[in-house]
Image: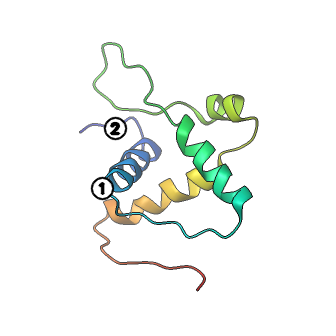
Amino acid sequence: QNFNNLKSQCYFKLAELIKDNKIYVHCESSKIKDNIIQELEVVRVKEIINEVKLSIESKDKVKELIGRSPDYSDAMAMRMYFELKGGNSTYQYGK
């Protein structure tokens, strides 16, 4: 598939892994958990008209929708860079 940019490609990979139940986030803070859920719920595919490149809505649009920067979802999406580059490792932070 053809993507508009690396960030879009990473978000599509993140969505694929979430859909396939290959991602688990252990979070003891309910506030952080709620923030992650809120951020991921507003990620949308940008409307494509006569283009073949897949893209997601801009960070500014997401900020407008949730009232803050989507830092958690951006970090999770950019972690997908390593998956796109052929990384097949399991990473764990914390316990």
N-terminal-most mark, 2 or 1: 2
In the figure, 63 relative to 24: above or below? above
Please give left or right for residue 27 compared with residue 45 in the image: right
**Amino acid type at mark 2:** Phe
Q: Nearer the viewer, mark 2 or mark 1?
A: 1
Residue 46, given in percent of the width and then of the height, sits at: 45, 25
* Neighbour tally class for label 2: few under 14, some 14-19, many 20 plus, Cα within 10 Å: some
Query: Which structural element holds mark 2?
Result: loop
Q: Taking 82 as reference, is 61 above or below it?
A: above
Badge number at residue 80: none
Query: Residue, x 50% and y 79% (percent of image)?
Result: 92
- Name the spot of residue 81 as percent of width and height, x first: 41, 60
Taking the spot 39% from the left edge, 78% from the top edge, the residue there is: 90
Residue, disc 1: 20
Q: Are marks 2 and 1 in contact (CB under 8 Å)?
A: no
Residue nearest the viewer, comparing 29 with 5: 29
Residue found at x 35% / y 32% = 54
Q: Position of residue 40 (x, y in %)?
A: 54, 44
Residue that lies at the very extreme toward the bottom in this rendered image: 95
**Secondary structure at numbered mark 1:** loop
Q: Nearer the viewer, residue 22 or 76?
A: 22
Q: Within the image, what quadrant is residue 62 found in?
A: top right
Q: Quadrant of the C terminus?
A: bottom right
Image height of 68 relative to 89, above or below = above
- Where residue 33 sits, quadrant-wise, is bottom right
Mark 2 sits on what residue?
3
